[in-house]
Image (cartoon, grey):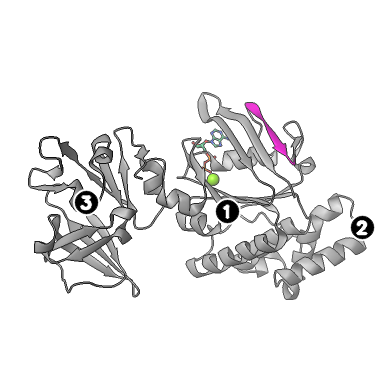
Amino acid sequence: MASIELKGVTKHFGETVVIPGLDLEIQDGEFMVFVGPSGCGKSTMLRMIAGLETMTSGRIFIGGEDVSDKGPSERGAAMVFQSYALYPHMTVEENMGFGLRMMGTSKAETAMLVQSTAERLQLTSLLKRYPKQLSGGQRQRVAIGRAIVRRPKVFLFDEPLSNLDASLRVQMRIELAKLHADLKTTMIYVTHDQTEAMTLGNRIAVFNQGRIEQVGSPMDLYRKPANTFVAQFLGSPKINLLPYSVDDLQDRIQFDTQCSLTSEQLGLPLELLKQGKKLGVRPEAISLCAKNQSNLQGVIEFTEQLGDATIVYVRLPWQQEMLIAKLSQQQIEFKMGDQVGLLMDSAQMIVLNHHDQRIDVR
Ligand SMILES: Nc1ncnc2c1ncn2[C@@H]1O[C@H](COP(=O)(O)OP(=O)(O)O)[C@@H](O)[C@H]1O
Ligand SMILES: [Mg+2]
């Protein structure tokens, strides 16, 4: 087990700056998730930690030791790839034991370690098979087994579940969380999937164009995103953004010439609203009421039944983006085309300024 420290890491590919400069400390035993849109530099950063890619500048420490000039096999890190990268001509058993044998582990000890790891991952009955005789989920499990069996100081996962179908992905996600609880080994997990990030991470680092926008626990980032990018990246459906201006004379905030609310109606202090430009409201923080019960009104464009919840898309007369509400229970009867009132829970609202930074509410 080991901490990981990234100090001033940069990466250029020729003229292209992929990582302009990154600092991060990952605690011993932590499950850290790197999340961000495709192409933002997550894999490049992970590969530099693994030693599979050179840095342009900066230092990387694993367990307090500077490993910047060390090769991949000397860093004590095991990586699991999206593509599984199993050796096709080797059985599951041979695939899992290969790294150990290369490290000079005896045949007997390798066999024992492979056996116990296979039991933990329910691979025992598959040990004699070749990769082509396995399903995608089984292959991924073997790839994880091959990483675990070497008992590395840190695990590096690069989108390991992306090639699996939805239900298997959920199952493997739970297994990975259990594995971490069990092994307590430091893990870095790269994904573009916000659900995986929210459910797996002790902490999440949100990447955007090679920079970290924010690092924190999933719920901290969800409730107190530093900026619009983080607010929009986490959460599904996406957070609603409502641009507004403040009418100084009447102390009202104005969404449109036809629609304004007092700070009291909104439940947020005017001083705060005056510093902002946009409200951010999570879909689950919105509820519907009869149209005469709110100054904020719209027309229901369509609805989606999820079984346990209903997603309602509401057309606001003044903005192109529809407002999305996620209702767990229905307060009123409604159907498509109805005009409804909208209520927003101020406790779950954020205020963003003209630099797209969140301003603290309380
Ligand atoms: N070997 C390479 N040569 C040139 N550009 C690269 C190379 N590898 C990655 N890149 C570029 O670096 C950026 C980040 O890529 P990557 O780290 O794979 O992003 P992510 O994993 O977040 O999707 C992309 O713009 C990609 O095109
Ligand atoms: Mg990638």
Per the picture, the main secondary structure of the magenta-coloured stretch is: strand
Q: Note whether 188 is above or below 301 in the view shown.
A: above
Q: Secondary structure at mark 1?
A: loop
- Looking at the image, which residue is at 22% across and 60% down? 313
Spatial CA span between label 3 and label 1: 33 Å
Q: Is residue 281 left or right of residue 229?
A: left
Q: Is residue 155 left or right of residue 339?
A: right
Report which residue position mark 2 lands on.
Answer: 106
Which of these two is toward me, 74 or 228?
228
Q: Quadrant of ligand 2?
A: top right
Q: Which residues are magenta?
A: 56-63
* Circle 3: residue type: Leu
Nearer-the-camera pick, 357 or 313: 357
The mark nearer the N terminus, 1 or 2, is 2
Residue ID for mark 1 = 202
Give the structural element (helix, strand or loop) at label 3: helix
